[in-house]
Amino acid sequence: MAEEFETIIKTCPEIKLYFIIDAIGAMRWRLNHDMADGRIPESEHAALDKSIEEAAIQQQEAVGQLTRFGVSPFVEGTKSPSESYWQWFHAWDHYIKHELSNEEWNELNRKLSVNEDISEYKPKGGQ
């Protein structure tokens, strides 16, 4: 599975990389939130903590692929997200959540499901 993930993040289009990074981040946030407020029993925390750590590593690996798209993903010498990364992420996040119409979103989903070209989907102003 790790090899498959690595192949995907090294070859996927930019928009798919955004979806991967965002989905992993959302999953990590939700698990941490649900553990903190008691929705998940403490007896399950250790196993979930390990899964969250593994997901964080995968997310960093995906973020590291942004160099393919001209983004410097990390603060030099660290694994902390750079300003360039945050600009990239917020541009894509805004594009997906606020700029696509329902019809465009449905067409994007259709194209993703049948592996059609999706290169026309990009935030305004670059990226």
Image (spheres, rainbow, N blue to C red):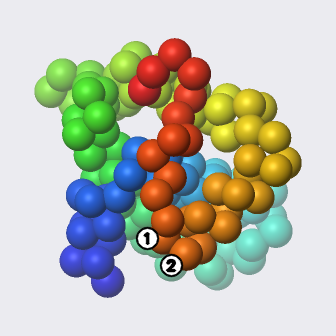
Compared to 95, does 84 lie above or below?
above
Q: Is residue 96 visible?
A: yes
Q: Tag 1's secondary structure?
A: helix
**Residue type, mark 1 in image:** Lys
Place of residue 113 in the rendered image (x, y in percent of width and height, measured from the top left): 59, 73
Which amino acid is tagged 2? Ala
Q: Is residue 97 above or below residue 102?
A: above
Q: Which residue is mark 1?
A: 50
Q: Residue at x 55, y 75 (%)?
A: 114
Mark 1 touches mark 2? (CB < 8 Å): yes
Q: Is residue 97 left or right of residue 115?
A: right
Query: What number of labels is visible?
Result: 2
Q: In the image, is 52 to the left or to the right of 97? A: left
Label 1, label 2: how many angstroms apart (C-alpha)?
A: 5 Å
Q: Nearer the viewer, residue 29 or 115?
A: 115
| Percent coordinates x, y for residue 109 in the rendering | 67, 63
| Residue drawn at x 53%, y 35% as measured from the top left | 122
Q: Nearer the viewer, residue 59 or 45?
A: 59
Q: Farthest left residue?
A: 77
Q: Residues within 10 Å of mark 2 (few under 14, many from 20)?
A: few
Q: Locate residue 22, reporting x and y percent.
A: 56, 49
Could you say which quadrant of the image residue 38 lies in? bottom right
| 9 to 41, vertically: above or below | above
The percent position of residue 56, horizontal first and vertical second, equals 41, 55
Residue 31 seen? no
Using a 10 Å C-alpha cutoff, classify the residue at mark 1 as few (fewer than 14 neighbours), some (14 to 19) or many (20 or more).
few
In the image, residue 67 sits, relative to residue 106, either above or below, namely: above
- Residue carrying label 2: 47
State the residue at coordinates (26%, 27%).
Answer: 70
